[in-house]
Image (spheres, rainbow, N blue to C red):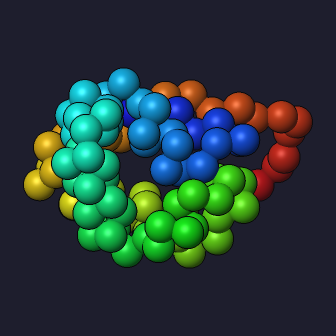
Amino acid sequence: FRFTMLRHWSLYDAMLHSGYVATRLQTWREVGRQSMHSLLAHLGLPLEACKQQFTHMSPKHIKQLNDRLEEHGPPHGLTDLKFWSFSYSHGFKVK
């Protein structure tokens, strides 16, 4: 995502402090925060779940985020939210 998901942050904080999301939605203004709340509502994520640590979010809500973000992001001015990156792998496992 274009917002950093740190272990000790919530989804709400990650989106609020992201340079990309903050400039697109203008989250420093009340209208921008309402737009972010509207986006989270369109994604089907309760605000209480978004404000808890990301590591404690339910897998159902994380899957909803992944599935619906590309669909509901562009109407709010957020395009290209997902991009290829790297992932950390530790150890070796034979499949």
Res. 70 in view: no
Q: Is 42 placed above or below 56 here?
A: below
**Number of numbered discs:** 0
Quadrant of residue 20 in the image? Answer: top left
Q: Residue at x 57, y 39 (%)?
A: 5
Quadrant of residue 35 in the image? Answer: bottom left
Position in image of residue 30 (x %, y %): 26, 46
Position in image of residue 24 (x %, y %): 21, 34
Q: Which residue is drawn at 52% across and 43% down?
A: 13
Q: Which residue is drawn at 71% across and 32% down?
A: 88
Q: Is 42 placed above or below 2 here?
A: below
Q: Quadrant of the N terminus?
A: top left
Taking 3 as reference, is 74 left or right? left
Q: Quadrant of the C terminus?
A: bottom right
Q: Is 87 placed above or below 72 here?
A: above
Position in image of residue 37 (x %, y %): 33, 60
Res. 47 in view: yes
Q: Which residue is drawn at 49% across and 50% down?
A: 12
Q: What is the residue that sits farthest to the right in this orientation? A: 91
Quadrant of residue 64 in the image? Answer: bottom left
Position in image of residue 66 (x %, y %): 43, 58
Taking 9 as reference, is 94 left or right? right
Q: What is the residue that sits farthest to the front in this orientation? A: 30
